[in-house]
Image (cartoon, rainbow, N blue to C red):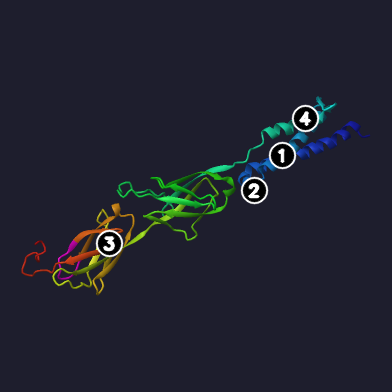
Amino acid sequence: MSNPSKSSASPPFIVAGIAFISGFILLLLMLTRAEYLTQAGMVNHIWYVLLLFLGLAAAICLFSLFKGYARLTGRVLVGVIELGGPTVVFFAVIIFGFTMAPHPATAFDLVIYLQDKNGNPLRLPKEDTRQLVHTLNLNFGNDPRAATVGQHGEARFFAIPYAQHGKAVAVQLISRLYELISTQHTVTLTSNELGLRVQVQTKQQTGHVQDSKTARPIAGAIIAVADKRQQPLHQTTSDVNGDFNLALPADLPNGIGPASIKANNYCAWTGAAILDSTPLGVLLKPLNPAKPDGGCNEQ
């Protein structure tokens, strides 16, 4: 013979169990996929559905399992409304949950770090006296943003509309030293901190070598530029017209590199290659075989 009370109590517990498990699954989804839900604008939607499941599970468990009792009476217009039992708990959970609802972010801050071609943090030269300013631009259409790059290669952007989160945005680097490596020139805003790889620009230094006495061009002269540690950076030779073209890194200290020019039967020349300057004109003095030093030290 069956037990009526047991059979009548089972369906509510089944419903409560289904509601609780469904709510737990939604809660797990919010905890593990929060970033994707935020991008899709679904956080609040799932939260409200979660409240329905939790309110239903709480009401059934409290009044079917623990035999609790609750009643809420209030006056509405000209009548009286009375809510009792599970209904009170159900609405109490939902109303309380509405006050705890997560508020969607409206804006976020972003830091973009410049990196070298190997992905290492970029450190801007401190000893450079040219007072260079490097600016990073993000193009949000009608709301373009610009930030100055700091000493540690960081560019900070504030209060970016959250609608841009997860989107690809055009980026531009304005600098006399560096340029973007990527040909796409975009960044995808998937995080509050991003890395952007850059490389040192190459500057062209042109010049002309000729004989100091005859003014004839000197072909085959070797032109070399070194860094501050006297390590060779670039070397080239003059053509038949005495012209040469040097490809120099833009991050030379203060834009100046020690330079030397040598040619057969001529005294060597030492000086400096200066970036962004006029073409370098050099007069080489012919060697004097009658002098011990070839007459190179004579004025």
| Dot 1 amino acid type | Tyr
Q: Which mark is residue 40?
A: 2
Task: Indicate which disc residue 89 carries.
Answer: 4
Quadrant showing the N terminus = top right
Q: Please report the bounds of the magenta region as a residue range.
A: 262-269
Q: Earlier in the sequence, mark 1 or mark 3?
A: 1
Read off the residue under disc 3: 278
Q: Nearer the viewer, residue 129 or 71?
A: 129
Q: Which residue is mark 1?
A: 48
Indicate which disc, 3 or 4, sits on the residue closer to the N terminus: 4
Spatial CA distance of label 3 from label 4 is 84 Å
Q: Nearer the viewer, residue 3 or 154?
A: 154
Q: N-terminal of the two: label 4 or label 2? A: 2
Q: Secondary structure at mark 4?
A: helix
Q: Is residue 136 left or right of residue 189?
A: left
Looking at the picture, which amino acid does disc 4 mark? Answer: Val
Q: Main secondary structure of the magenta part?
A: loop
Q: Earlier in the sequence, mark 2 or mark 1?
A: 2
Taking the image as drawn, is residue 149 in sight?
yes
